[in-house]
Structure formats: structure tokens, C-alpha cells
Amino acid sequence: MAMEDKNGQLQQNSYVKGELLHHIFINEEEHFSIARIKVLETNESFKEKDMVVKGYFSRLNEGETYVFHGTFEQHKKFGLQYQVNHFKRFIPETEDGLVAYLSSDLFYGIGKKTAQRIVKELGETAVSKILQDPGVLNSIPGLTQEKAEQLSKDLAEHQGFEHIVVHLSNYGFGLKMAQKIYQAYKDEAITILEQDPYQYVFDIEGFGFQRADEVARQNHIPMDHPSRVQAACIYTLQQSIQEGHVYLPLENHLQAVDELLHGEEHQIEPETITAQIAELNKRKKIIVVDSRVYLPSLYYSESGFCTNIDRIIKQAISEQPADAELLKIVGRIEEEESLSYGKEQYQAIEKAIGSKLMVLTGGPGTGKTTVIKGIINAYAEIHGLSLDPDDYDNDATYPFILTAPTGRAAKRMKESTGLPAVTIHRLLGWNGHETFEKDEDNQLEGKLLVIDEFSMVDIWLAHQLFKAIPNNMQVLIVGDEDQLPSVGPGQVLADLLKSGLVPFVQLNEVYRQKEGSKIIQLAHEIKNNQCRHDSLQQETDFNFIECPEYQVVDVIIQIVKRAHDKGVDLRDLQVLAPMYRSKAGIHRINEEIQKLINPKTNQRREIRTKDITFRTGDKVIQLVNQPEDGVFNGDIGEISAIFEEDEGSGQAEEVVVAFEEKEVAYERKDLANIMHAYCTSIHKSQGSEFPIVIIPVIQGYRRMLRKNLLYTAVTRCKKSLILCGNKQAFIQGVNEQDTNRRFTSLEEQLRELIENVPQPEQEEEGELSPYDFL
Ligand SMILES: Nc1ncnc2c1ncn2[C@@H]1O[C@H](COP(=O)(O)OP(=O)(O)OP(=O)(O)O)[C@@H](O)[C@H]1O
């Protein structure tokens, strides 16, 4: 950290003082610049007359002098550059220098005489005095109030960002965080930081509670300050979202807040926390209902989703065929498709046609896709609608909407049904700022909406989607309830099914098994808690290679090598593992496969980050939703190009990834959004399927191995599944239920609605209705 002593002397190890000659590259939005400077002074053994500096700073003034702090970096093409951590405009410390600075063109209306009076009155530290308190200018003889105001404003503007950067560096914040802070608060940044650092926790991404605590301590803000307690209340709720919770029970919340606030030398009384929770509740910063504490966005998502489910299921259905008529229609579809629907499958088609909203659930190979097609075909025939998009004027008038939460799932839907399908984000028109074009005031157009892979949809997205569904639309939700729940908060599919409010059909009979699939059989044995050692016998499409833990990575490499040598397209082969950092973790497996498949050569460009080396030709996975670029968490692509920085053309350093439908360019700062995908996490594989899947299973993964995790992993495979490691660890894992309960109130809220739903007519004997489950 750079510090100045009392005399303003630099105590930083490395510095370069230089006059800015010209800018090479400027990104105004990011405050990122590359510039050439004339070196005036440095404590480094740098002998050249000028050099290139780069870092997160705004446009600097050419001809002015700055002191930069940072480190030298050797750039492959451009040689030695100085990576700036922070910097400061050099203000001459002599009285004459300061007078020249204040009377320069930078400050309108300040002549030499006025500048001399300011320096005489305020001394060599005049600039920081004015910045801290513009009122000091009132004492300068002959300086009108108007000019004084103008000068302090101009000084603040010129010094603003730099001043803030220097100030923040005293708290240990780097340029990048300083830039984020400056964007959010501008000139207020320091005042807010020093008076109420906890505000940063809410407004600045990546600014944690502990950081705010450190700043508060340095500024002697008491540990029981209301702001601190309130920040802890909100921060703990934000953290709980990571575990999938929609709310925290008051008791758990109090405990979590207490743990966060508790220090060796200070203790916060429970009453203080309760009082601040009440205060936040009053100000609608959190919502407390029935001893449950919610963040408002999640509370309103959950209650909004319930309201919309209620609205939709209460609507009447426009046209409904008589039973005999539907039988005839389904018979015709069976003929066209050359199959005969099973009892459950027919029931699913019948119930979907007769319900405003229905959930279709079932494991792999039970015919969910087959039934989706049956429902769409039957709907089209009943309503006299063509399935061919070319028969409609434009996309908006096409009556069938097929959607899924990820790009890959939408693509699979499109392939299996032969109809257009899009991601939920695309369907709703994501505008990149957490809002969508489609909402309650601008609803979707269409007649039948089918949402696949619904287990992956969190409560926030579910709410956004359902508020955009118009009254005249019929809705079919499809998902496998035994899969892992959504990455985001909630367990919407499971809660919908448990509530009993919404009609649903569960498909149990497995059809793909009839074609001799061991993979499907294993999936159902896991699902039905019947997986034993003899379930893991070798079959044509399944093998469990037993090996000790230390050999598991070698075994994976051998399998991948054999597949590669045989000409298998590596996009069709996926290694799935549950953990990132272990001896047989995702990172290690990726490194080893990269060495094998895509080693370093002179032909392949590469770019190194702290942990990873990316090379052209590498298989990579997107780690976050980036809807503005049309890529989503879990999408897999290949690095098609790496561009080095080019001063001449202004080309920034970039990695270009070719995804299935588009190319996306990542600057260095965005490379954390991707990682190698030779091996990916099971969580990230949700919604995707691969012909060949390899899953290492070892005792070292024990704390992660759970039934729904292994079930999700196994069901990602379509043709050939290879497990390797320890059979006992696998058997123990599939017998381990996920006991991490997610706190959601959706099921309860939906149940409360049941009283208001008109009771259906008497069901035929043997048919399931939601009311059978109450
Ligand atoms: N009634 C049926 N008669 C004959 N074959 C069927 C029937 N239902 C489904 N199948 C066949 O079973 C296989 C699995 O069906 P489908 O793909 O619809 O299941 P799914 O539940 O969508 O599976 P997954 O989730 O694994 O994709 C397909 O080959 C399908 O043609």
C-alpha cells in the first residue's frame, strides 16, 4: 500500500514520475487507459527516456506530470510496460510551482495574483485543504464567492477521481475497486466511505461486509452503529441466497447476524439486532412476515408468482373437445407418429388439453418429449392451427411458444420437436439491466406455452416469466423433480408439485429402457433408491472402472486419449465432477486434458490469467448468464481466436469464443466468466446432454456426493457412460439424500390459494387429481 508521510514523501517501493506525452488507448466507460509518458524520475532501474503506463484511470491531461505506482510487466509484443496500481497528479510542492498550477488554464478566472494569495493563506497543502473544505477559500482576500465556488468545483473535477483513488489506496483499495466506487458516488465517495462505509456493501458489487468493518474501525465508527447492524441484516440475507434460500426464519437470521457482528471486544445485544430488523422492515428494506425474513425482491417474486399462478388457473379454457373427440385426435397422432401412448402418457395429453396450466414430470426416457409433441399436435388440431411457422406473418403471431432456461436446453427442445424454441431470457426480451421487455403491461403473444427443464428455473425468473403470460394462454411446465434444484433461490418445480394446487402428471414407465439402455435403468434405480453393487455391472453402454483415488485422473486421461485417437469429437465427450479443488478436482482434470488435447505449440496463441492458460482450440464453458451477448451459464464453446493488444489499431487483448450459435469476445477483465470445459461441474451440466459422459467418483468427494447430484450426472448421458473410482463411494452417495433444506414459502402460499380455486367436476375413477394429494 502506498502511503505518504507527514511531509508528503512517497513511501511506496516502486514509482515512476512522468509527464504524459499522449494516450495510446482510452476506454472512457471503464476508465481504462494506456499512455506514453516521459520519465522524469523513478526509483526503478529503468533507463529509457519514455515508457508506456496502463491501468484503470480516466483521461489524463497531456503535458501534466503524474506520479504512478505499480509494477513493471513484460508484454510479449510491446515490451516493458508499467501496470499502474494507483497514481496521483504531481502538484508542485514549492510555492512557485503551486502558484503556476493554480493560475494555469485549468482554473478559469484565477490569475497569478489570486493564486499567490491562496498559497500565502493556505500554504503548500492548499489543494487538499480546498478539496476537504471549500470554505477555506472564504478567507482569501479579493476572491469573490462565485470564483471561489468555481475554483473548488474545478479542482474537485480535476482532482476528483485521482484524489479518490489516492484516498482509497490508503484503505488498501486498488484502482479497479476505486473505479467502481467513483462510478457509483462520484465526489461523495470519500464522505460516504468514512461516514457510512456499510452503504458500500449494498451499492458496490464485491464490497463485502468485512471490508466495510475495517474502514469503519479506522474511522472509529462504533461497532453497534445502527448502519452496521442493518448492513449485517441485509448482508446475511444476500449470502443466504447463495444457498438457495428465499427467506431465513427469524431465529436463523438473528443467529447469522449475531455471528457476523460478534467480535472479541464487542458484543451486540439481541435487542439491538431485533430493533434494526424492525426498522428495516418499516423502511421496506427487508420484509418480515410470520417470523420469516425476506429481501423484498424475493418476497415479491414469490408472492407475485403465486398471484399469477392463481390468475392463470382461474381462467376458462376456450375450446375443449369431448372425450370421444380427443380420443380420435390422439389416435390420429399415434398413427402419424407410429406409436401407441401408454396410459400415463394419454392421461398427460388429456389433462394438459383440459388445464390452463399443467406440470409434466418424470425421469429420463419416460416420454416427456414424446408427450410434449403429442400435446402440441393435439392442441393444434383442436384449435385448427398450423404448426408450420411459415404459415404465419411473423414470429409474434406463431401460437406455440417453446422455451427453456438455458441455450442448450432450448436447442435440444428445438431439435426434438422440430419447432422453434428460445431461452426464457430471449423470449422475455432481456435488456441487460435485470428487466425484461415483456412484463404484465406488455405480455407474450401466443396460445400454448411449453417451458422445459423447469427444475432449473429460480423464483425470480419464474416470476418474470409468469407475469408476462396473458390470460388466454395455456401453459405446460415440464421438468424432472429429482434433478438438482435451480442455482438461484427457490425450488419452484418441487414446491409447485408439493402444493397440489396445479394439475400434474408424473410419468413413471420408462420407454427408452425397452431399447436396452442401462443408463436409463441406472437412473431409475437411483431415483427409486434401488441402486446396489450389482446395478453397476458392465453393459454395452455402461462401465464402472474401479481404481484407487490416486489413479483416477490417469484413468480419465487414458479414456479421453483412446476416444481422441479413435476420432471421437470431443464436444461429444464430457467429464463431469462434483468438486473444483481437489487432487481429482475439475481444475486438475482440465489441466491434464488440456495438456493431452490442446498442448502448447508455436502455432496456438495463448493468454494467461492468474490460474488458467487459455489457448486457441480450448473447449470452454460460460460461468454466468450474459444474456446481452446471448450466452448463458453452462453454455459450452471453443476458443476460436486470441487477439493480442495492438497499439496501432487500438485492438484490445481479447479471447473470442465460438458458441453453437454465436461468437462472443472477452476482454482480459472478463475472462473470469469462462473456464476450461474438458471437465465441468455436475451443477453446470444441468440442462445439457452428451453422448459420452465420464464421471469420477471417489471417497474424496464424499461431502458432495448426494442422490440428486449423481442422478443429475448420470442422466446427462445419452449413449455411453463411464464411471471410474470407487463403487462404494457411488453407492453411499446415491443413498445420501440432500438434507440441505431450502427455505421457501411458495408451497405454503400456493396451498392457501386452493380454497379459492373452483373445485373440478368429479374425476373418473383411477385418475389422479391434485386434490387426491391433500
Ligand atoms: N408410448 C411410446 N411407445 C414407444 N416408444 C416410446 C413411447 N414413449 C416414448 N417412447 C420412446 O422412448 C424414448 C424416450 O422418450 P422421450 O425422449 O420422449 O423421453 P424423455 O422423458 O423426454 O427422455 P429424456 O428426458 O431422457 O430426454 C424415445 O425413443 C421415444 O421415442
Image (cartoon, rainbow, N blue to C red):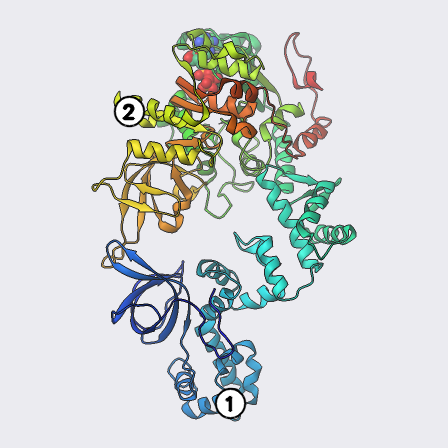
**Dot 2 corresponds to which residue?**
564
Say how many tags the image has. Answer: 2
Amino acid on which the number 2 mark rests in the picture? His
Label 2 CA crowd tier, 10 Å (few <14, some 14–19, many 20+): some
Measuring 49% from the left and 43% from the top, which residue is drawn there?
A: 436
Comparing marks 1 and 2, which lies closer to the viewer?
Answer: 2
Label 1 CA crowd tier, 10 Å (few <14, some 14–19, many 20+): some
Measuring 45% from the left and 37% from the top, which residue is drawn there?
A: 633
Q: Position of residue 82 (x, y in %)?
A: 33, 63
- Residue that extends furthest to the right in the rendered view of this protein: 271
Q: Position of residue 677 (x, y in %)?
A: 38, 34
**Dot 1 corresponds to which residue?**
143
**Is 404 positioned to the left or the right of 237 in the image?**
left
Quick check: 248 above or below 370?
below
Measuring 27% from the left and 57% from the top, which residue is drawn there?
A: 650
Quick check: 74 above or below 625?
below
Q: Position of residue 504 (x, y in %)?
A: 60, 20
Quick check: 35 above or below 449?
below
Q: Position of residue 579 (x, y in %)?
A: 48, 33
Q: Work out whether residue 13 or residue 168 is closer to the camera in this orientation and state it.
A: 13
**Is 66 positioned to the left or the right of 580 in the image?**
left
Is residue 60 shown to the viewer in this render?
yes
Ligand 1 falls in which quarter?
top left
Measuring 43% from the left and 68% from the top, which residue is drawn there?
A: 12
Q: Work out whether residue 293 or residue 442 is closer to the camera in this orientation and state it.
A: 293
Q: Secondary structure at mark 2?
A: helix
Amino acid on which the number 1 mark rests in the picture? Leu
